Amino acid sequence: MPASTLPPASSPVSPGSFCAACGAGLASGARFCHRCGTASGETAPPVAAAASTAAPSGGLAGVLPWGVAFVALMALVAMVAGQNFGAAKGSRIDGSSNAVATPSIDGPALGAGAPGSGARAPDISSMGPEERADRLYERVMIYDEAGKRDSVVIFAPMALAAHELLDNIDLDRRYHAGRIAEAAGLADLALAQSDTILQNDANHLLGLMLGIRAARLAQNEDRARRFEQQFVRVLDAERARRLPEYDMHRAEIELALGRARTTP
């Protein structure tokens, strides 16, 4: 599977421009809306824009048309929105109230970031591309682990778009993109990221872990087991390489190892 290339970032906007999604005023040169995260110059919401403008040879995974991935994600957004409509306050549906500052992500200074607290989320337009992508990845992972499904589908399109805009994406951030896709239920996109990692580094533990997760999401247990067998076989040699991303994802590696050793 050929490795993908990434499209150039959006051009800056002129003074006095406004966000096409929420109407907020944009500072000169801002690439993202400080209020909702929409890329500057968008004439449609981020999901629809990404679906309509992705080139076959560009984007985060050239092997999978971005339009298909985002159409699937839009369907998921619509499903969750339908479940959330009319839900009583305090119900199990978390809703869009999670689009506020999150202390574990944004820092203790924003700990009062509940609706009406007056706390403001960080201005993502002031962040560098890598920091923006990393911050959105962390947010999606926290919501996914907490079971906040509707918040995942709210933030996953922004997180994927942030990774797509990176000039150079390393294997660690490609793993992040795959995990975001997995959290959003996009098994094909997650598998594409796994395949691209493994094409660059055939035994990379993050590529194998992502392959296991994505294959199980796609209900392909045979493929998941093949990934697991390779993971166990190369684990010691890979750990000896002491790659920084292995240290950052140490807990996930241990979980994958435990699962691989107990799966029949």
Image (spheres, rainbow, N blue to C red):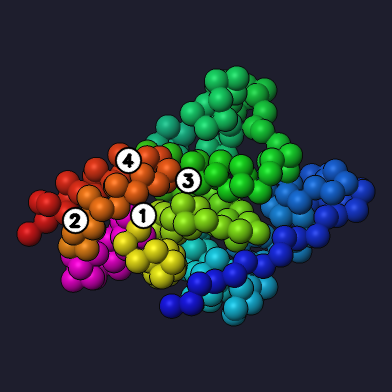
| Residue under the point 65% across and 24% down | 119
Q: Is residue 224 left or right of residue 61?
A: left
Given the image, on which type of amino acid does mark 2 rest? Answer: Val
The quadrant of the image that shows the C terminus is bottom left
Q: CA distance from mark 3 to mark 4?
A: 19 Å
Q: Which mark is residue 206?
A: 1
Looking at the picture, which amino acid does disc 4 mark?
A: Arg
How far, Cα to Cα, is label 2 from label 3?
28 Å
Q: Nearer the viewer, residue 249 or 84?
A: 249
Residue that mark 3 sits on? 140
Q: Which residues are magenta?
A: 205-228
Q: Position of residue 162 (x, y in %)?
A: 61, 54
Disc nearer the start of the sequence (1/3): 3
Number of residues whose C-alpha sits closer than 10 Å to that of mark 1, classed few (under 14), some (14–19) or many (20 or more)? many
**Residue 51 image offset from top left, x and y in percent:** 61, 71
Camera sees residue 150: no
Indicate which label's residue lies in the foreground, 1 or 3.
1
Mark 2 secondary-structure assignment = helix
On the image, the x and y values in percent for residue 56 come to 59, 80
Residue 41, disc = none
What is the distance, in whole Å, between disc 1 and disc 3 at their CAs?
18 Å
Q: Which mark is residue 250?
A: 4
